[in-house]
Image (cartoon, rainbow, N blue to C red):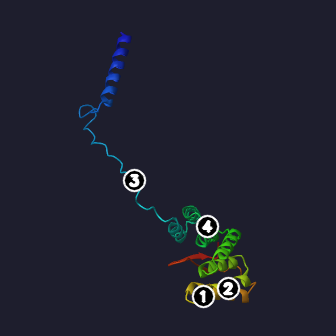
Amino acid sequence: MIPTLGRLITISLFSLSLAACSSGGFGDSLFGPKSPEPLDAPGVDLRVQGADNLETGHRLMASGQYELAIRSFNRAAIDRGSVDAEILSGIGTANLGLGRLGQAEVILRRAVERDGSQPEIWNNLGVVLMERGKYADATQVLRKAFALDNGESVSIRDNLRLAIKKTESFGASSGSTDEYKLVRRGSGDYLIRSGL
């Protein structure tokens, strides 16, 4: 009698599994109302241009997502096939945001070598130098940024004033909470507090 019961259970389970595999599924009879037709996922439109990695990097910088910004700037370099001054400036500035001052200085100096006509890059290099306590060097670099900008940027002017003040009062309290203003090409500034 037990083998017969086992066969009956096996046949019942087999029948249920076949019913589930059929095109109609279980329907309304066993497990409630039948589910609606499955939805197809939309296709990918390959004609659409993807997001600009350089602009994405700048937006990530503005939101304080420095690691992600570095990745985005690296992808922008791959897209362009070269590393230009704007990409180097973005990577260097992101490293400053992460507190990697040595790396930031090296990368921003490379950016200035590639394109020394951009006041934004000079400004951000000056901020790194201030962070590293190189106030005299920062003053010279920020003077260069101010001259290239024709004195139009309030951020660069404020950073230059701060560098001059720090140079004059070298050795004063190092625990200040001054705000340096990082500048990017185009519209928008980055703001990083000196207490990184």
Q: Which residue is mark 1?
A: 157
Residue 15 makes an appearance in the image: yes
The secondary structure type at the circle numbered 1 is: helix
Q: CA distance from mark 2 to mark 3?
A: 51 Å
Earlier sequence position, callout 1 versus callout 3: 3
**Comes first in the chain, label 4 or label 3:** 3
**Image quadrant where one finds the N terminus:** top left
Q: Check residue 83 in the rendering and tell me which mark sits there, or answer none.
A: 4
Mark 1 vs 4: CB contact within 8 A: no
At label 2, the amino acid type is: Ala
The mark that comes first in sequence, 1 or 2, is 1
User: Sequence order check: which comes first, mark 2 or mark 3?
Assistant: 3
Residue 163 - label:
2
Callout 4 touching callout 3 (CB < 8 Å): no
Q: The residue under label 4 is which amino acid type?
A: Val
Identify residue type, mark 3. Answer: Val
